[in-house]
Amino acid sequence: HAKHNGRNDYSFFEPAMNVDARAQLKLLHELRLGIEREELVLHFQPKFCASTGAPMGAEALVRWQHPELGLLAPDRFIGLAEQAGLITRIDEWVLNAAARQLQAWRAAGHTTWQVAVNISGLHVRHHGLVGHVRDVLARYDLPAQNLAIEITETMAVRDAEAIAMLEELAALGVCLSIDDFGSGYSSLSYIKRLPVRELKIDRSFISEVCAGGIDAAIVASVVTLGRALNLRVVAEGIEDAEQQALLSELGCDVLQGFWLGRPVPASQFLASGQPAVEAVPTA
Ligand code: C2E
Ligand code: MG
Ligand code: MG
Ligand code: MG
């Protein structure tokens, strides 16, 4: 810590302060402004029924259109927002924008589509969340089951308080999904206690699923678990035709990945022509 010793104060402190930390502080300041200036944007990545190939809706993924740095991926600012207590505002913005888009798709005839949003584990503990979800459903006149909420397992969602909140969300009728399932803090007793409807297998098990190692066995076990618990099993991060074929063979219900469709702005989502499962990616 800097000592209060007159004019040397600043120069004493400044070199000691990590360049990275300063950059992060600057970014945080810009993020606060950026949220107000509506610089956040949503991209939508399609999800497909594994057996029919029909599009089932999309996952909304946030990006930040930074005035100088360009389009930033969530990894660049979500962690920062969580640390700084800004995540609630981001997730609320996302929830509203995704619901608005779902309403537009429903009006265009896609009434069975489901849109998923990612909610931070920290936000799940926030008392405003359930009310906000309820407001958004009413505002855009949406059936609750057409909205999915993806939660990554972290310590933050393991205590009784967080579980009570998830139960309230489930009671509204929204589809709760465990994201990145199998990584981090997964435990089976936890799955049993939570009112979830969907398991999204972590991408790390998908990337080498065709290599003939343990990953295919893990995917098959998650599918069996999902069946036994009456949960939908989603494979995300599918990057080629071989993975697609194997994952549907293993019994995953829903498929998602760059091979089937990249995250794109809503304006390109329909134009991308609701690619069939066999579609060859353009990129
Ligand atoms: P996630 O929810 O697990 O989202 C999947 C991530 O994998 C997305 O990255 C997506 O673009 C990427 N992805 C999809 N298909 C493929 C593929 O075939 N190959 C590869 N390599 N990657 C694929 P993205 O958009 O950068 O998001 C990263 C994470 O940031 C998300 O992981 C989610 O945890 C978080 N996130 C995104 N949007 C939000 C949000 O609105 N709120 C919160 N709290 N977190 C968000
Ligand atoms: Mg997700
Ligand atoms: Mg995931
Ligand atoms: Mg994730």
Image: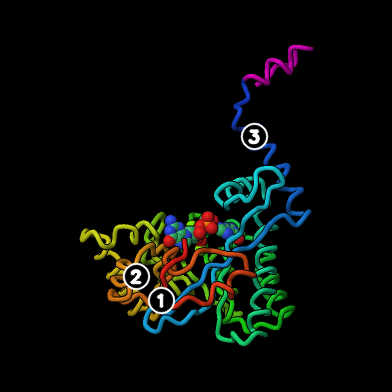
Location of mark 1 (residue)? 277
Q: Are marks 1 and 3 in contact (CB under 8 Å)?
A: no
The rendered magenta stretch, by its main secondary structure, is classed as loop
Which residue sits furthest left? 212
Q: Which mark is residue 23?
A: 3
Of circles 1 and 3, which is in front? Answer: 1
**How far across and how far down the image is residue 107, in percent?**
67, 85
What residue sits 66% from the left and 82% below the top?
Answer: 142
**Colouring convention used in this rendered image of the protein:** rainbow
The image shows residue 65, relative to residue 187, as above or below, that is: above
Q: Which mark is residue 51?
A: none
Q: Is 188 displayed left or right of 119 in the figure? A: left
The region drawn magenta spans: 1-15
Of circles 3 and 2, which is in front? Answer: 2
Q: Are marks 1 and 2 in contact (CB under 8 Å)?
A: yes
Location of mark 2 (residue)? 244
**How far across and how far down the image is residue 244, in percent?**
34, 70
**How far across and how far down the image is residue 68, in percent?**
69, 43
Q: Is 277 displayed left or right of 249 in the figure? A: right
Decide: few, some or many residues near mark 3? Use Cα within 10 Å; few <14, some 14-19, many ≥20: few
User: Cα distance, mark 1 to mark 3?
Assistant: 42 Å
The image shows residue 168, relative to residue 127, as above or below, that is: below
In the rendered structure, which amino acid carries the disc numbered 3?
Ala
48 and 268: which is toward the camera:
268
